[in-house]
Image (cartoon, rainbow, N blue to C red):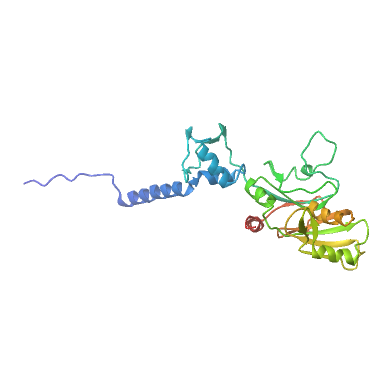
Amino acid sequence: MKKGKQIKTNFNHKTSKKSSHKRMNNTLKNHNDKIRLNKFISNTGICSRREADKFIEAGVVTVNGVGVTSMGYKINPNDIVKFNGQKIKKETLQYILLNKPKNYTVRNNKNTKTNSVFSLISNACKEEVFPVDKLGNADTGLLIFTNDYSLSKKIGSKHTVIKSIYQITLNKCLSKLDLDKIRAGIFINGQIKSFSSISYIKNKEKNQLGVEHHKGGAQYVKKIFEILNYKVTKIDRVFFGGLTKKTLLRKQYRHLSKNEINILKRL
C-alpha cells in the first residue's frame, strides 16, 4: 500500500497563534470600548444620567437609526446617537475656574455694552461652557464654568452642601450685638438662617468680616445683613468647594485638575 502523499499547507502555527491573539485582543478592545447609552448621553453634558434614562425610556433616543428604550443598552464608539432627531456630538468636558472681577456680568449677552465674564474665558476652550452659579455684577471671586450639565445641576441644587467662604465689607461697622444675633440665627420667612461661622477680619475695621456657609450663594449672605439694616458693599468669594483663588489673579482663569473635578463630583 502506497503511502499517501503529504499535503503541504501554508499553515504556520506561530503565525496562526499570533493572528488569533490579535483577533481576540481586538474583540476585547471593542468590547471594552462599549459604553452605556445613558452614560454617553450624560458625558456630552446635555443632561444627567438619570434624566438620560427617562429620555431613553420615552423613546426619543435612537442608535444608528433604531429606537432604543431598554435600560443598560451599550453602544460602540462609532455608533450614531440621536436625541429628538438631532445627532449628539460627544464633547470634551471642560472645567474652568475664574477669579471674577468687579463690574462683570455672568450673562453671555452680546447685545449689551456691559462687560461679560465670557470675554475673559473666550480662549479657554472651544466648547460652550456656562457658570454653575451666580455672582452679581459687583461681586468678585471664584466662579466655575463647565459644560458638564450633571455637575452644574448638582452644585446648583439647594440640597447640595458646599463650603463657601466670603470676605465682605459692610456700609458700617457691625456691632457685637448684631454679630451675636447672626451667630444665633436670624428669622427669614419663618425659618432661622445663619452662617457656619462669622468673624471680624483681624487687624481690620469692624465692617470687614469673614463668612463661611454651606448652602446658598452670595445673595443669601447679603439677605442676612439686610435684615439687620446693613448693606454689603463688597463681597469676594475666596473659597468654593475646596477651591481657592491663591495664585489666581483677578480676571485670570485656569483649568481644574482631575483631582479637583473629582472632589466637586463627590459633593
Q: State whether residue 121 is above or below residue 234.
A: above
Q: Name the residue: 82% across, 56% down.
A: 224
Q: Is residue 175 left or right of residue 157?
A: right
Where does the image place residue 124, in percent across and percent down from the top left?
A: 72, 46
Q: Quadrant of residue 193?
A: bottom right
Q: Is residue 230 left or right of residue 193?
A: right
Count numbered badges in the picture.
Answer: 0
Can the viewer see residue 228 in this picture?
Answer: yes
Q: Is residue 186 left or right of residue 50?
A: right
Where does the image place residue 127, in percent across and percent down from the top left?
A: 67, 41
Determine the residue located farthest toward the left in the rendered image.
Answer: 1
Q: State whether residue 38 is above or below residue 184.
A: above
Can the viewer see residue 200 in this picture?
Answer: no
Where does the image place residue 216, in percent across and percent down from the top left?
A: 74, 54
Q: Name the residue: 93% across, 61% down.
A: 173
Q: Nearer the viewer, residue 46 or 162?
A: 162
Where does the image place residue 6, in percent across and percent down from the top left?
A: 18, 46
Determine the residue located farthest toward the front in the rendered image.
Answer: 190
Q: Quadrant of the C terminus?
A: bottom right
Q: Nearer the viewer, residue 235 or 190?
A: 190
Q: Name the residue: 8% across, 46% down.
A: 2
Q: Nearer the viewer, residue 203 or 193?
A: 193
